Image (cartoon, helix red, strand yellow):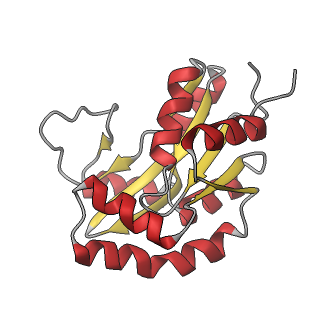
Amino acid sequence: MKFKSPYIVFSAPSGGGKTTIVKMLHKKYPQTVISVSATTRPKRPGERDGVDYYFLTREEFERKIKEGKFLEYEEVHGNYYGTLKEVVDNHVRDDRVVLFDIDVNGALSIKKHYPNAILIFIKPPSEEVLVERLKKRHTETEESIRRRLQRLPYEYEQAKKFDYVVVNDDLEQTLKQVEEIILEND
């Protein structure tokens, strides 16, 4: 199966389904690899360096920022998160297709580095469905759900800059639609 680009970028509001879609694509297409971010946050039990994240000290991360080593990075809750250009370039050199599961700002930054990247925004069918999905996770407090919803207008505004917006109402249909976007027609 041939992909239209070696860079496939997914963004969505939290609970939109992007991580599920990325994992399904990775399982179905062995030539794909899921981009692993670098972070300064402490390693959690069971996490492995280079698998879950590339764990860097704050000093290492800031040095790499100065050296222009990141495609994108952001500071969230006092920790840095970012995508290392060298890691992505190595995957593409090895004929891998890189799947990114990233926020809207990171996605737009990746598009600047790789104009042939395909940006896909996964949109929930409604705010009510999104809230329902977040509550089903049992990992979100009412406060964190409220914060995530406050970010929706900004994310939807940024989504207008993406190549595609796909409404994730039915996962199977959404996956089919995504495959039509990213795969060459035989």
Q: Quadrant of the C terminus?
A: top right
- Where 25 sits versus 161, above or below? above
Give the percent coordinates (x, y) of residue 77: 27, 70
Q: Quadrant of residue 159?
A: bottom right
Q: Quadrant of residue 7?
A: top right
Give the percent coordinates (x, y) of residue 119: 68, 52
Q: Residue furthest left?
A: 45
Give the percent coordinates (x, y) of residue 185: 86, 27
- Where 29 sits versus 146, above or below? above
Q: Is residue 135 left or right of residue 102?
A: left
Q: Is residue 60 left or right of residue 10?
A: left
- Residue drawn at x 55%, y 61% is 124
Q: Is residue 70 left or right of residue 156?
A: left
- Which residue occupies the foreground of this view, 80 or 123? 123
Residue 51 shows up from this direction: yes
- Residue drawn at x 62%, y 24% is 96
- Residue drawn at x 75%, y 29% is 3
Q: Residue furthest right?
A: 186
- Which residue occupies the foreground of this view, 118 or 93? 118
